[in-house]
Amino acid sequence: MRWTLYELIGLEPTASASEIAARCRRLLMLTHPDRAGAAARGLFGLIAYAEETLTDPQKRAAYDERLRARNKRGRATSVPRPPQGLGRTMLDKLADAAVARLESWLGGKGGAA
């Protein structure tokens, strides 16, 4: 089974370029191998590819056209699905862990120590 780049980053195809860039920056930070370990390298690379493709208007238009054509033919989309437990669920867990760590450093919710 395969995912679209939009599914990989957890946004709809109607998302704006600025929404995509912001989501990708967040995901790249969370999955950077220096932060998340060497096991995250593949996911980091896929997210970097998604950002490069979906934030450039010409590349995004070409990608969307390929996606529409493949969907019409009933073929799979362009990104292999990560193993069970990865994707939005795993990324959400990474984000939650990062927020919890930041909150603990700041002395609790709201940043007031």
Image (tube, rainbow, N blue to C red):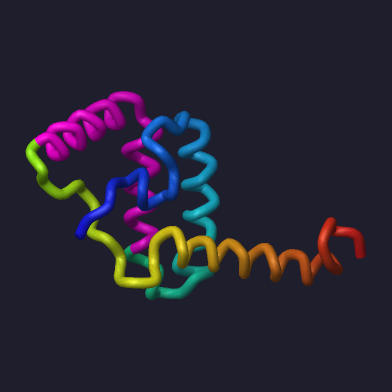
User: Which residue is nearer to you in this view: 4 or 50?
Assistant: 4
Q: Name which residue lies at 32% across and 47% down.
A: 49
Q: Name which residue lies at 38% across and 74% down.
A: 39
Q: Name which residue lies at 33% across and 55% down.
A: 46
Asked where in the image residue 71 lies, by quadrant, the reply is: top left
Q: Quadrant of the C terminus?
A: bottom right
Asked where in the image residue 81 lies, by quadrant, the reply is: bottom left
**Where is residue 94 drawn, in percent x and y?**
54, 66
Residue 26 relative to residue 105: left or right? left
Q: Main secondary structure of the magenta part?
A: helix
User: Which residue is nearer to you in this view: 82 or 21?
Assistant: 82
**Where is residue 55 drawn, in percent x and y?**
40, 33
Is 110 contained in the magenta span? no
Residue 66 relative to residue 84: left or right? left
Q: Which contiguous range is marked in magenta? A: 43-72
Q: How many circles with numbers are drawn on the protein?
A: 0
